[in-house]
Image (cartoon, helix red, strand yellow):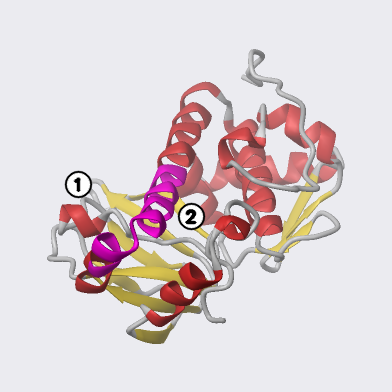
Amino acid sequence: MLTHRFLLGRARDALSEEERQVVEESVSAVRMIPARTTIQRRGELVTSSTLLLDGFMCRYLDDREGYRQLVSVHVPGDFVDLHGFPLKRLDHDVATLGPCTVATFEHRTIAHILERHPRLMRWLWFSTMLDAAIHREWIFRMGRLGAEGRVAHLFCELYARLEMVGLAESGRYSFPATQADLAEACGITGVHVNRVLRLMRERDLATFRSGEVRILDQARLCKLAEFDPVYLYGQHSMWVAEPVKGTADG
C-alpha cells in the first residue's frame, strides 16, 4: 500500500481493513517533488491535502527581511497540510527538504470520508491533533532550552518519529538537512549550530554528517534535550526516555 505509513507506530492497528482501503483508494495522485521546492504558498487557496510518502518536508514562515523560521518538519506517514481542509488556506509555506514522494487527497474526497466514514474521520482528526502536540513541544523547546538542548531535542524527536515508521534504528537515521536548516528549526545562527554540533561530537553525544544523524549516547542526549516522547503518542517504541523536564540546559 502507498499509504501504509499513515499512523504507523501509533493507531495504524486500530484502523479496520476497510478503513485502510478507503485511505488507499482516496489518493487522487502521486507526485515526486525535487528537493528545496515550495509546494504551497501562504495565503493561497487550498483544495487538496498532502500525505508524505517518502522524504522530508517542512512548514516555514519568512520574516520581513526574508529570513526563514521552520515551524515543523514532516516525515513519511505525516499529513503535511490536513488542517487546510477546514481552513481553505495556510498561514505558512510548505516545502521539501530533500526529494519527496507525496500522495494527494482532494478535499471533496475528504468531505466524502467525513460523511460516510465518521470513524475514519476521527483518525484523520487524531492526525491533526498530533501536529498540535508536536507544535506545543516545539514551543517548549524554543522557549525553555538553550542552543545545545534545542538541537538535541530535534535529533531525539526525529529519531522517535522515524523509528515509528521503520526508518530509524541503532541510533541512526537519514536527514537531508543542512546546518542552515537546523539553525532555522532551532532559532539560532548557523555559526552557533556549527559550534553545537562540534560540542556534541566531542562529548560523544551525537554526530551529524553527510545527511545522517547518529546518536551515540541516547540517555545523555535525552537528558540534555529534556526529551520525553509521550507527546508523540507512539505505540511499542524502542525509544526509552525518562521524563526529565524541570532543569533546562541553559
| Start-end of magenta stretch | 112-131
Disc number at residue 73?
Answer: 2
Residue at 70%, 68% (x, y): give it. Answer: 210
Q: Give the image quarter of residue 22.
A: bottom left
Circle on res. 64: 1
Looking at the image, is mark 1 or mark 2 nearer the viewer?
Answer: 2
Check disc 1 and report its element: helix, strand or loop.
loop
Q: Can residue 70 be seen in this view?
A: no
Q: Is residue 122 located in the magenta-colored stretch of the structure?
A: yes
**Residue sitting at x 71%, y 23%:** 243
Q: Nearer the viewer, residue 150 or 8?
A: 8
In depth, the one of 26 and 77 nearer the eye is 26
Q: At which x and y percent is residue 32?
A: 44, 86
Could you say where residue 148 lies in the image, as x and y percent from the top left? 65, 34
Alpha-carbon neighbours of circle 2 within 10 Å: few (<14), some, or many (≥20)?
many
Q: In this view, does 230 lie to the left or right of 199?
A: left
Amino acid type indicated by mark 1: Arg
Q: Which amino acid does label 2 sit on?
A: Val
Q: In this view, does 78 lie above or below 98?
A: above
| Residue 194 spot, x, y in % from top left | 63, 48
Give residue 42's mark: none
Query: In which quadrant of the rendered image does the N terminus lie?
Result: bottom right
Q: Do the residues labelled 1 and 2 touch (CB within 8 Å)?
A: no
Judge whether 11 appears above or below 210 on screen. above
Seen at 48% across and 41% down, the residue is 134
Question: CA separation, marks 1 and 2?
Answer: 22 Å
